[in-house]
Image: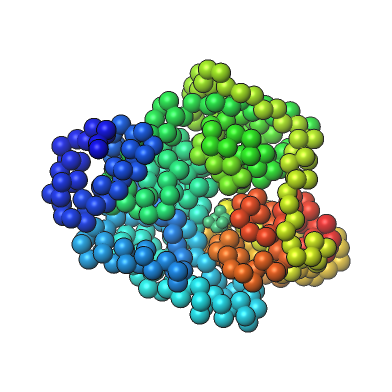
Amino acid sequence: MATMQLTPEQQSILDGAKGETLAKVMKTLVMYGEAFGATKMVPVTSEKGHLVTSFGLKAMGAVYELMDQLIEAGAVSGQQFSVDPKPMDPNVPASFLEKFVFNKFMYTRQNSYDEQLRKMGLLNDDAYTCACYLEEVGNVPKKGEVLSWAESSAVVFANSVYGARCSRNSGIIELFGSIVGYVPYFGLVTDEGRKATWIVEIKTEKMPEAQVLGSAIGMKVLDAVPYIKGLDQWIGTELNGTAKAYLKDFGAATASNGAVGLYHVENLTPEAVEQGESLIAEGAQTYVIDDAELQRVMDNYPVIWKDPDATPKLCFIGCPHLTYDQLVDWTEKVEAGLKESGRSKVAIPTVFTTPPAVKEKFEKTPYADRLKATGVILSYICPLMYMNNPLAGKKPVITNSNKLRTYTSARYYTNAEILNYITKGEK
Ligand code: F3S
């Protein structure tokens, strides 16, 4: 069956030289690669891995059995890894019924799964976040490194902003790559696969909302690589904290509203700076985005609340998790908004989500008390996991995350609208 050329070392693993379990892991990766036309396997060269499956969902019995088998066979990850955010946090508001459902029917395996993750190579107990690539978390990939990750928002960030190389893998496949130390060579791992088949021209009169721009591009180019022109006039030509935070939110929207795994931003992202327009493939299509196009995209988001006129009951900000600077910025904006409206606390329950390590850093600063005084709750939770139950669909939740909007009943609002909602009680 094999059309893939394996090295003697890879072949010997496949043949069972390192045990039956590792042979099965290798076989799975080879079959996965062949399905995508991979010609060879290449070594995973990043220091750390990242797993998407962070939740001990009762229904995932097969995953826990697999983890037990791997641990018993000593087939643990060859690299330490971070993992997506936890699905529960006692500080996040939930009704009695919701808590009952979470604890008794959904995430019943959380503690035992956490234990399995530790045995498999979890970086540390604070390593639960999708924004693993933030410096505070310590899983920052380097340019050219080959990764075995699957979290779509992290893959697109690592590929685009750091110039790392990673396919849009699925959960468990990424763990297998970290165990065996090889991934199939196809798509975004190859030079050819990193060429842009879409040119996106930004012609807006004002700074495009990151999450709407990402949504528009994702829906248009689907899983292709876009080369984006004209964004540097809004976010600059330096990959500083502000530009990275913008690209984090933008990228997550491209990856969830479409299936983008890599984008190039002219004069900004590393490959675009180095190679310029030579990154654009022959025959690339063009998509022009102006303010009217962004408005059209937003106007087409369906409202799937049971009562479209309901008053929001909860607001989530931080999907993907917020950076430290974003937390400070939101704290100041909420304070200013409350001052303007004459309120002392936010008008609707509001949760900011951030990596545990960023939360710890933030909590050591005076901003922590200032944020607390506004009534906003700071959490490490994944809002999507929180809303991943039948009860959540009945709750009118608002968010500035286009990923959360895509996968749940949460309703999207721009940053300015969200700020108004939480500080003034209206859009
Ligand atoms: Fe992160 Fe969960 Fe959103 S993994 S991107 S906070 S859906």
Residue 97 shows in this picture: yes
Q: Is residue 426 left or right of residue 168?
A: right
Q: Looking at the rendering, in which quadrant would you find the C terminus?
A: bottom right
Residue occupying image coordinates x 66% and y 54%: 405
Q: Hey, which residue is sitting farthest front in the picture?
A: 1
Front residue (pair 240, 15):
15
Rendering quarter of residue 36:
top left
Q: Is residue 118 above or below residue 321?
A: below
Image height of 250 relative to 62, above or below: above
Which residue is at a point 73% across and 52% down the rendered structure image? 302
User: So how many labels did they put on this image?
Assistant: 0
Image side of residue 5 versus residue 411, left or right: left
Residue 248 appearing in the image: no
Query: Where residue 213 appears, x then y in whole percent?
Result: 68, 39
Query: Where in the figure is residue 379, as x and y percent of width and height?
Result: 58, 66
Determine whether, in the image, residue 400 is placed left or right of residue 163.
Answer: right
The residue lying at 79 percent from left, 53 percent from top is: 417
State the scheme by which the image is colored: rainbow
